[in-house]
């Protein structure tokens, strides 16, 4: 049955994302989608959703949400904490990396996100209409999400109610990205840079600046010299998230999920897919180092990331939250049945419109 | 024109096949030739895992899913295709789009005319006599980069870009012409406005009006006709297809 969330306070920098909008880049449409796909899928798994389900990406001050049709299951991942305000008047802290069940009239007040990007998944996902194949919010064109905008007070987000009463929640370890250098494939415009510039790029730390959003991240550090003034511009060609553009001032800009589809600055290198999610967590002042790899290494790194995520999901545990001890649940349920049951409620829960309760 | 294509890695999820480094209709014809060969292969069920094909002035970027695709193997195929695909022989669709060049919609017309020592009417007449070719869509959704502006109208960008360019403004810089699909900042010279939307997210099959390879000519309309057309478009009595010129037909004079 349909669940429904109402946004009481939109917070700042929060929008619905899924795995992205592919097949429209030749029409000038950004891919959009999660900045950190593994982290989003952690939230999805904890809430009982399959990977790539639409959830709320949070980049600033988290929203406050009220459950209009429930019960729902929710889970946070990333550097963020929320408070559950129960309809009864009591409140509890909800840390990241574990699910919680919200009843009708409960609300969830999510705090500030520190250090980059966090996710909130809700049971059944954010079932806003797909636009051009995706639910991802792309604010520049006003598409996806809720009317193409960031969460605002009064927005209503359809999701799915829990199909059957299950007091067990799911928790997991914090999934962490590696902290080595950011791996890149050099090019495509390597020839526009001096040998010294390439050496400088690969051997010096660069600091993330406050000039960053979902389109890109400006870095500060030693300027990278082009082979000449004319080499600082190119006749525009294709770009992609992770591409590192270097305009005439020599300071790199790493493109992110909402980046344009073409660009007129030469690109010294492109971040590999496995390390792209780490760019979602570059607070101003954080330093990055770059390390050049080949395609085979990039492929291996991606396989390794998938394997780490699969291991993480395999190790999820169910538990009975304090205060929910109920004899029927205690004796009737298998407390270590893990993901099978966590996913189970989705099977019997078709998402039906309109969004009224029951 | 014997540039041999280069295969450039754009990370581990895209290849750029580059035919040259300049704006040149002959290069673009090769880009579109490769574009149609790859699209035909995809339609035939080959080349699974390619997610996007992005033609530009001088290159084709092929985006793929790195988990599904052997990147090296795809690169080899692309380079083979590029060497043999030849030039596109298709002229693309032909559009005759209305544009109003009245002063309030063409804030840079007088300045451009003065700089070129022409009467504004002459600038407009040259604009209307030119046939533009869409090289690529980029910068923002539906934004067409069109070549074909007569050299005598070439102007650099504004020294300081406008904070707000009205949606559907016709803009020129160098020998390029474009239309801003959305209200946005912009530094090109504004010579008019069209009532036709350049991007419509509700059109799932083709949200962007124009695509790479299309040809465009401008039909000058006065403010009254502009307003009329805008109303007809808003009311659904006119649609995009009404601005297409049949392949076999001559461009209207």
Image (cartoon, coloured by chain):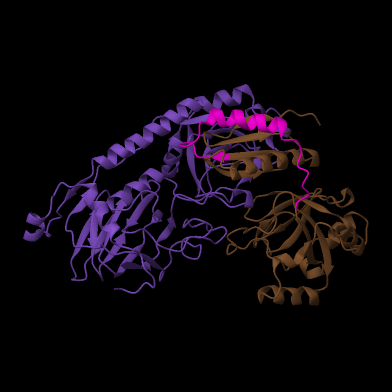
Chain colours: A purple, B brown
Q: Is residue A235 visible?
A: no
Q: Is residue A16 left or right of residue B153?
A: left
- The location of residue B183, given as percent across then percent down, is 65, 63
- The location of residue B45, given as percent across then percent down, is 56, 42
Q: Nearer the viewer, residue A110 or B32?
A: B32
Q: Is residue A350 above or below residue A26?
A: below
Q: Is residue A224 left or right of residue B159?
A: left
Q: How many marks?
A: 0
Q: Is residue A76 above or below residue B84?
A: below
Residue drawn at (73%, 34%) of the image = B21
The verdict on residue B86 being magenta is yes
Q: Nearer the viewer, residue B20 or A186?
A: B20
Q: Nearer the viewer, residue B238 or B201?
A: B238
Q: Looking at the rendering, in which quadrant would you find the N terminus of chain B?
A: top right
Task: Determine which quarter of the picture holds residue A281.
Answer: top left
Q: Is residue A70 visible?
A: yes
Q: Is residue A50 above or below residue A247?
A: below
Give the residues drawn in magenta, as a range.
B63-92
- The location of residue A68, given as percent across then percent down, is 31, 71
Residue farthest toward the front in the current orientation of the protein: B44
The verdict on residue B51 being magenta is no
Q: Looking at the rendering, in which quadrant would you find the C terminus of chain B?
A: bottom right
Q: Nearer the viewer, residue A222 or B221?
A: B221
Residue drawn at (59%, 30%) of the image = B75
- The location of residue A346, given as percent across then percent down, is 29, 57
């Amino acid at each position: 049955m349909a669940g429904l969330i109402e946004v009481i306070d939109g917070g700042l920098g929060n929008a619905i994302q899924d795995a992205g909008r592919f097949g429209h880049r030749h029409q000038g449409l950004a891919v959009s989608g999660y900045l950190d796909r593994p982290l989003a899928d952690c939230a999805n798994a904890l809430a009982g959703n399959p990977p790539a389900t639409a959830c709320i990406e949070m980049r600033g001050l988290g929203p406050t949400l009220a459950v209009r049709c429930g019960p729902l299951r929710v889970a946070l991942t990333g550097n963020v904490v929320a408070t559950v305000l129960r309809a009864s008047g009591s409140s509890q802290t909800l840390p990241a990396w574990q699910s919680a069940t919200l009843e009708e009239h409960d609300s969830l007040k999510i705090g500030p996100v520190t250090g980059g990007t966090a996710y909130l998944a809700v049971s059944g996902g954010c079932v806003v209409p797909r636009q051009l194949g995706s639910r991802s919010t792309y604010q520049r064109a006003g598409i996806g999400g809720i009317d193409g905008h960031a969460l605002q007070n009064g927005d209503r987000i359809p999701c799915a109610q829990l199909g059957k009463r299950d007091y067990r929640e799911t928790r997991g370890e914090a999934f962490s990205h590696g902290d080595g250098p950011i791996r890149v494939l050099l090019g495509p415009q390597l020839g526009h840079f001096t040998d010294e510039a390439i050496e400088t790029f690969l051997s010096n730390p660069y600091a993330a600046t406050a000039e960053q959003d979902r389109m890109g991240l400006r870095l500060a550090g030693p300027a990278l010299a082009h082979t000449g003034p004319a080499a600082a511009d190119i006749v525009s060609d294709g770009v992609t998230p992770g591409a590192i553009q270097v305009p005439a001032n020599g300071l790199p800009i790493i493109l992110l999920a909402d980046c344009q589809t073409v660009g007129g600055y030469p690109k010294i290198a492109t971040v590999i897919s496995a390390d792209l999610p780490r760019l979602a967590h570059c607070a101003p002042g954080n330093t990055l180092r770059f390390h050049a790899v080949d395609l085979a290494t990039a492929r291996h790194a991606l396989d390794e990331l998938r394997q780490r995520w699969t291991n993480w999901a395999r190790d999820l545990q169910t538990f009975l939250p304090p205060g929910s001890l109920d004899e029927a649940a205690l004796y009737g349920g298998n407390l270590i049945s893990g993901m099978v049951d966590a996913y189970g409620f989705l099977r019997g829960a078709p998402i039906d419109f309109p969004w009224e309760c029951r | 024109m014997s540039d041999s294509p280069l295969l450039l890695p754009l990370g581990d999820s895209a290849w750029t096949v580059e035919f040259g480094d300049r704006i040149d209709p002959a290069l673009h014809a090769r880009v579109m030739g490769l574009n149609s060969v790859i699209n035909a292969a995809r339609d035939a069920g080959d080349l699974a895992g390619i997610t996007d094909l992005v033609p530009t002035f001088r290159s084709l970027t092929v985006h793929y899913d790195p988990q599904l695709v052997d990147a090296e193997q795809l690169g080899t195929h692309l380079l083979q295709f590029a060497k043999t695909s030849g030039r596109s022989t298709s002229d693309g669709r032909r559009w005759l789009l209305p544009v109003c060049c009245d002063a309030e919609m063409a804030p840079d017309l007088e300045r451009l005319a003065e700089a070129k020592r022409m009467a504004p009417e002459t600038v407009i007449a040259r604009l209307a006599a030119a046939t533009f070719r869409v090289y690529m869509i980029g910068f923002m959704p539906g934004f067409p980069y069109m070549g074909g502006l007569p050299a005598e109208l070439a102007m650099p960008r504004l020294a300081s870009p406008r904070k707000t360019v009205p949606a559907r403004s016709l803009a020129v810089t160098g020998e390029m012409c474009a239309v801003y699909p959305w209200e946005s900042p912009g530094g090109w010279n504004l010579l008019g406005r069209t009532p036709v939307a350049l991007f419509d997210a509700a059109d799932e099959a083709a949200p962007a009006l124009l695509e790479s390879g299309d040809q465009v000519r401008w039909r000058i309309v006065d403010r009254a006709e502009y307003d009329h057309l805008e109303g007809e478009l808003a009311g659904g009595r006119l649609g995009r297809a009404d601005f297409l010129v049949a392949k076999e037909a001559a461009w209207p004079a």
